[in-house]
Amino acid sequence: MANYKKASQDRLRVETKRGSLSVEQLWDLPVTELDEIAVALEAEYKESGGKSFLTDTKSKKDKTLKLSFDIVLDILETKIKASKAASEARENKEHNAYIDNLIVDKKKGEMREMSIEDLEAMRK
């Protein structure tokens, strides 16, 4: 979360084909667009020669690029996980509904096999 804190303090904006977007606005983008932005930011960061393990030697531009990349990548990964979770939940719901229908059919089948006396005894 420290990245988001830094981004809000710096009022970070990420350049996209839609223009300059805030971190909050990035959440509204589709994953395909986020992926394109992440790829472009990573390439720009690599071209800048910004890789260094000594944070003092990195330029402000390199730090901003890295922060932008990290945040876009985190948003992208979060949205992908949420989409997978929603898909799994939907599949589980459909599966359980199918099982419930089979159970109802089985119970109906069992009741068809019961004698008239047994069925009359079940009346309320």
Image (spheres, rainbow, N blue to C red):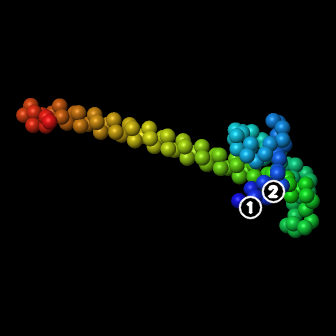
Residue on which the image places disc 2: 9
Q: Residue 41, position in %: x, y?
A: 83, 48
Is residue 106 visible to the viewer in this orientation of the structure? yes
Disc 2 to disc 1, C-alpha distance: 11 Å
Query: SS at mark 1?
Result: helix
Amino acid type at mark 1: Ala
Q: Residue at x 60, y 43 (%)?
A: 83
Identify the image quadrant of the C terminus: top left
Q: Residue at x 70, y 49 (%)?
A: 75
Q: Residue 99, position in %: x, y?
A: 36, 40
Q: Earlier in the sequence, mark 2 or mark 1?
A: 1
- The residue mark sitting in front, 2 or 1, is 2
As drawn, is 64 to the left or to the right of 99? right
Identify the image quadrant of the N terminus: bottom right
Q: Is disc 1 surrounded by few (<14), some (14 to 19) or many (20+) residues within 10 Å? A: few
Q: How many marks?
A: 2
* Quarter assignment of residue 35: top right
As drawn, is 72 to the left or to the right of 50? left
Q: Residue at x 39, y 38 (%)?
A: 97
Residue on which the image places disc 1: 2
Q: Judge by depth and name the residue closer to the eye, 56 or 1.
A: 1
As drawn, is 81 to the left or to the right of 118? right
Amino acid type at mark 2: Gln
Q: Residue 122, position in %: x, y?
A: 13, 37
Query: SS at mark 2?
Result: helix
Q: Residue at x 40, y 41 (%)?
A: 96
* Quarter assignment of residue 62: bottom right
Query: Is 70 above or below relative to 104?
Result: below
Q: Is disc 2 surrounded by few (<14), some (14 to 19) or many (20+) residues within 10 Å? A: few
